[in-house]
Image (tube, rainbow, N blue to C red):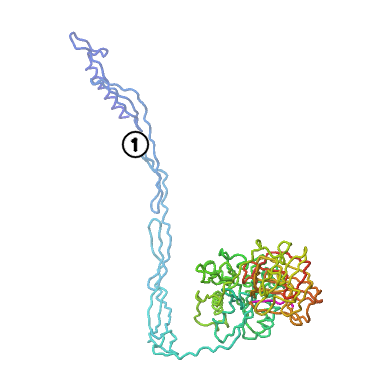
Amino acid sequence: MKRRFLFAIIVFILAIFTLTACDFIPGMGGTVQPNDDPPHVHKYETVVIKPTCTEGGYTTNTCECGSSYIENEIAARGHAYESTVIAPTCTNSGYTIHTCSCGDSYKADETAAKGHSYQSVVIAPTCTEDGYTTHTCHCGDSYIDSETEAKGHSYESVATVPTCTEGGYTTHTCHCGDSYIDSETAAKGHSYTEGKCFCGAEDPNYEPPKEEPEVLVNTTVYLVGDSTVCAFDDSYYYPRYGYGTQLAGYLAPEATVVNLAISGRSSKSFITEDNYQTLKNSLKAGDYLIIGFGHNDEKSDDSARFTDASKPYTDDTSFGYYLYNYYIKLALDAGATPILCTPIVRAATDDGYNDSEAHITATGDYAQAIRDLGAQVGVAVVDLTAITKAEYSAKGFEVIKNYHAVISGKYDTDGTTVVPNWVSIDKTHLNVYGAKFVAYHLATELAGISGIGKYVKADITAPTIADLTPLAGYQVPDYEAPDLEGYEPVDHFTTTTDGWYGTAFGNTGGSPQSSSNGYIASEVSEGVFHVGQHLDSGSNKGKFEGASDGFAFLFRQVEADKNFTLTVSGKIIHSGSTNQAGFGLMLRDDCIINQSATGTINTNYVTAGFLCNKDSMNANFYRENTSLKKGSVVNGLAPIGDSFTASIERVGQSVTVSITYGGKTYTETYVDFDFFAVDNGYMYVGMFANRGTVVEFTDVQFEITGISQGA
């Protein structure tokens, strides 16, 4: 109010001043004098006074002459307070302060101080420090109470005994880390026994006594198995060797190796052999039996050999059943130690070893069956499948082919040097280098088997390629498979039935092409075949004797991988009744057509027929590795008019020959017989006779029955 009053006074004074100064301004009450200046016009400057919290606002208009006036008055705004809350603390009260922008303020809502709120921390006494409790408020205020004295040390004692080189002492350690040592004693010094102290130190002056080598008792290591284990006697360029033939080279002389393995046998068929009886009669306590089957157990097309690897060993048709009951149990019952071997792989040109090459077939995994059996009955297993697979896969076919037998050699480009004919490689059977390679790995594994391991020589070494040598004195065969498409036989060798061909060859006593020598191998009418040799003069030609054969042969050419059957009926129509004559059916390695003179031939064959002697016959004679084998004796000779039936059947590696004569049947089975030593691609089967004997063959039935499963 005082301000308003003062302001009114000022305005009043200014108004009087204005009236005085502006006496001559029209409208302002002045009098215009004659000859005066023109009347004055007001020019106002405007000042706006804004309202405050306590004072009103207005606008002042002021002229330079001093005249002024006020307008636009507005009331005071009043206070606008902002509030700030001051929280109470432990020692100070709280309140809310309200403050206006003009500076005016006041307090309200006062609250009392909260007082201290302490948190307590107990400091436990240690061995050397007192304990106490600290009480601390969040405001920082604190105090200490509950003081306790230090506990003092509590030591645990550990005695360290003196050693040969270090003294002993007792360490006393408090849980606080404080420690001290006392009770120290001197080192004891070394005490040697047989040159060594119990602490491990060796006496530098000790000379050990000379150790006497362990005296090995004599033992026998028997091997049973198939052609990958057994011995051979063949005329290959790189002959076949089973790994059993090379094992002795890696064993001590106290271990006698007896290799009873036979080519072509399975765990099932081997038990029918004389060698199995030898094993049963010979095996004794302390001996070892190495069992190496598998290759031929796979032959599902041959019931005499097949065993099933997919079935448990408790099944009497399974592979495991035969291995356990006829070999493992036999050894255990005798007090001998059986050892199972998985079969070696077959060489694969594509280096793939996941199917039959590794013995995995539709009837089971034969290697895995052996592994499983060993684990189930607690018999050691040497995994030759895994060993050979790893070697063959890593090195590739071009390297590992050197482990395998090769049937024939050939002349190199110089025309004189003989080299292996790799077309004739035997992918199943090993040569001597391969046999040593497998035997070396077998011996290496045997070294880790209790008992037999001590018989393995120390520091054995693997064979080298230097061990690979061809057969001494090998001669490249002067032979080519007959060109049957271009064959133009002479009249006495003609046939009309497709696939049959006539010939005579070998030690024929003259050219078989000439009718003057009396040979015939001809189809004289449809389905009727005459085969043999006869001259009215009684001149008998051809023979079967130790060094060479000569005969008429009416034959079929059969591919090496084919199974077949051939059956015939025969009747003697001419008979020389002479020594060295023969007749019947024959399956052989090679065949010659167009022979123009007598020759020498002694290659492999089997017969379903008879070899005539002076007053008897031998049934089912055969020739193997140049040696003539005569077979069962039949008393008497076959006169003209006598009849017989004969058959030859091939299933895989098994060939069965049979001839029935005089009310009696003579049968032989040949397993893994070599029909490919000369002609690697074909076999030749047919009807034969010689030396004054001619046979009329009828009811001739030939059939290809499937694909051979091979070796």
The reply to whether residue 46 is in sight is yes
**Quadrant in the picture for residue 452:** bottom right
- Farthest residue, direction left: 35
**Quadrant in the picture for residue 569:** bottom right
Judged from the image, the secondary structure of the residue bearing numbered disc 1 is loop
**Quadrant in the picture for residue 66:** top left
- Farthest residue, direction bottom: 209
Left or right of 659 in this view: 682: left
Q: Which amino acid type corresponds to the residue marked 1 in the rendered image?
A: Cys
Q: In which quadrant is the C terminus drawn?
A: bottom right
Q: Which sits in the foreground, 19 or 554? A: 554
Whether residue 251 appears in magenta in the rendering, the answer is: no
Image point (58%, 77%), residue name: 243
Q: Badge 1: few (under 14), some or many (20 or more) residues near its Cα, within 10 Å? A: few
Q: Give the percent coordinates (x, y) of residue 697.
A: 77, 69
Image point (53%, 88%), residue name: 214
Q: Give the percent coordinates (x, y) of residue 628.
A: 67, 79
Q: Which sits in the foreground, 674 or 569? A: 569
The residue at which mark 1 appears reads as: 102
How many labels sit on residues? Answer: 1
Q: Give the percent coordinates (x, y) of residue 48.
A: 31, 26
Q: Which sits in the foreground, 237 or 230? A: 237
Q: Is residue 49 above or below residue 236?
A: above
Q: Which residues are magenta?
A: 619-624
- Farthest residue, direction top: 34
The reply to whether residue 193 is in sight is no
Q: Give the percent coordinates (x, y) of residue 264.
A: 66, 74
Q: In which quadrant is the N terminus drawn?
A: top left
What main secondary structure does the magenta stretch of the protein show? Answer: strand
